[in-house]
Amino acid sequence: MSDAPPPDPATRLVEPRRGDGTPALSIRGLWKRFGDKIAVQGLDLEVPSGSFYGLVGPNGAGKTTTLSMATGLLRPDAGELRILGVDVWADPTAAKRLVGVLSDGIALFDRLSGEQLITYHGLLNGMDRDTVTARTHDLLELLDMREAAGKLVVDYSAGMTKKIALATALIHAPRLLVLDEPFESVDPVSAANIRDILHGYVESGGTVIVSSHAMDMVQRMCDHVAVIADGRVLASGTIDEVRSGRDLEDVFVDLVGGRHHTRGPEWLRTS
Amino acid sequence: MVAHLLRLRLLVMRNTLSRSPWQLVAVIIGAVYGIGILVLAFIGLTLLGSAPVELARTIVVLAGAATVLGWAVVPLLTSGIDQTLSVARLRVFPIAPSRLVLALAVCGVLGIPGAVTLLAGVFTAATWWRSPGIALAAVVTAAIAVLTCVCASRMIESLNAGLSSHRRYREISGILVLVPLLLLGPLITVLTAGIRGAADALPKLADGLSWSPLGAAWSVPSDLALGHYGEAGLKFLIAVATLAVIVLIWRRTLATALVTTVQPETKTAEAGHIGLFGWFPASPTGAVAARSLTYWTRDPRYSRQLILIPIFPILLYVNSRTLDLPSLVTAAGPVVAFLVSLSIFSDLSYDSTAFAAHLSARVTGRADRTGRVAAVAVFAVPVVAGITVGSAAVASSWAALPALLGLSLGILLSGLGLSSLSSSRIILPVPAPGDSPFAAKTGAGFTTSVTTFATWGILAALSLPEIVLAVVAGVVGSALLGWITLVVGLGLGAVVLSAGIRLGGREIERSGPELLARLRVPR
């Protein structure tokens, strides 16, 4: 069992480097097709460094596909992806070091206890044991999961599973956090706690991208937003630019279309 | 309502069939097999009509009791005989328990296993074709017995579903039930020796069973034929009472199951206890090894493969005694090495999309491969060496030990190397994490067996040098050749292992995202 001495991520600093111009994530001309369905068609997106970026879109819009390609988990058919200036598909190792991922629909090694799972991710990232132990402790504390640390992840509730997945994304102190549906089935109190953690992370210079279809939450939580549908960006910019004085949800529905103005079949009206 | 559920059941069956032509082929083969058994049963049972009543009685009662027992045991083996109509899925509909019991019983009888049992049961009437009165009674009692089969099976499933909320129980019970089944062969060999002497014990056994819930219904016609009307009446009562009790228990558990949700029981470790992660080196390789080994102890999809380790030595030992071939037992080491080393030949499939963690953390292919091999080697090397030495001791063939060790360890190392390469390319449809380890994936059987056999063939080819050497050393009885086998086995094994890890690692690094995409495909 001989590994090359791993680069110690603890020596990497998350320094506030706002305004140096390099976007945290830049996507140009991204294409991906699955069989005869084109999931992403020529998507362009720029996520400024230090922003809290919301990605909204209807089901099947290509959010998860785009984020998978941006984090090196899915090979694009065409297009250029850069994380903090590093080309994701030319130098995946350097790019992946900069990013922490919470993917929707990706399994965890759930026969491990929560603590073991975080430790596992830390060690996989090549960190030394002391750093891993200390950070695991901190993360469990931060996410309010001390009590559940020894429980197998398979026995966790959906919300706790999201939290432990978030912890595994944070363990190597990434500069960019990509969270796919992080608040799905998380209770309001935990969601508020997670939001605080994410805000703190952004204030210290990190960048967060969240995908969601809870407009209200994106509107309150994020400072930037992009609306995606049919594998394209329909609108993007700061929240205020995109909603231009209206409610984000109305803007979204207008952009995406497909709203039906009917009140359901006759028999469903009970009175 | 009953008709609705039945139609739903048949619709699901049709849709499953139309999904894959191989599925259809499998069903056709199964149907031909089932019809063959039915035809044979019919012929046999008709011929029994000319045999003495006592013989017919012994055979029908024993076979009948075994059928009832079999139906009751099956739900313990599989996670639900019929997931289509499992209580968990029907819970949301407003159906009264009594109607559900009726509907599920009808669906059970009209399903394929139920129908085959029903027909075979009704065929027992053929034995009594000379006396129509008894034949009629046989039809009635067979119907009761088959209903008992179906309801007992459903009842056990329902009871089991309650216990199954304890995950650990579910995982262990499914595996333990397998042990007697695998040992059935040697058990029969050992038992027949005893039974051959006491063939007259079987009618007594049948007599005993005929008073038990298992055999009562099946013995009524022969009691009538023997003129024991009183006994026949009593046994008929036993059979009806059995059915009634089973239905009542089943209805009760169903009624409870319909209003309770599964509450998983959990085990908690102390904070700070990270188990094997504390034992292995704090490197990506060590972490992968610790994770894999943890899975070997916790995930039934892995741990069920460990059953093979004790079973093969026992099988070979029993056969070496009965066949009077003492050296047969020495095959135990190589066979176990063969099976254990290939148990991870499609390891990535078991990871499912959790493999994304390795991809995100840019784990080198080498660390990934080495870790998985190390986890198996930690227990496989001592176990294989132990079995080999033990088998040499049992066969008192110490002279052959070097050759045997060379063969066993050579196969083990080569097999691990082959697994390292094959698991970087082969993604098989396997049970998802948390599913029953025996839950077959639709249409998976064919590809899985072809790939498995191909891998076995390749490993046999890779280990050919030490196999030939060991056989020659054994035949010639040369100590020198034995030591050469040991050196060649270890050397060749080490070469294959390191090549496998290197090639497999390169493959993982090159096509990681593609592998993840294949793991992600909903299967």
Image (spheres, rainbow, N blue to C red):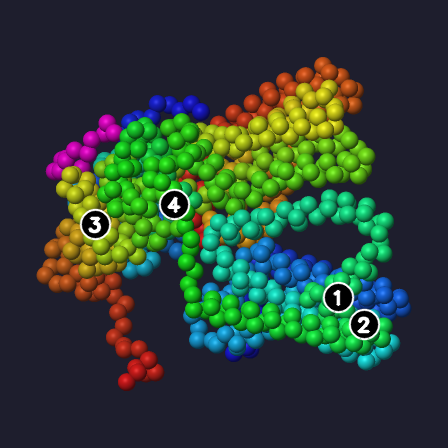
B485, above or below B330, in the image: above
Q: In this view, does B95 lie above or below A55?
A: below
Circle 3 packing at 10 Å, graded few (<14), some (14-19), many (20+), is: some
| Residue designated by label 1 | B210
The residue type indicated by label 3 comes to Asn
Q: In this view, does A149 lie to the left or right of A51?
A: right
* Mark 2 crowd level (few <14, some 14–19, many ≥20, 10 Å Cα): many
The foreground one among B206 and A27 is B206
- Amino acid type indicated by mark 4: Thr
Contact between marks 4 and 1 (CB within 8 A): the answer is no
Q: Do the residues labelled 2 and 1 touch (CB within 8 Å)?
A: yes
Q: Mark 4–mark 3 contact, CB under 8 Å?
A: no
- Give the residue type that dot 1 points to: Ser
Instruction: Provide the chain ID for the residue under circle 4.
Output: B
User: Seen in the image, is B66 located left or right of residue B373?
Assistant: right
- Residue visible at 57% across and 42% down in the picture: B305
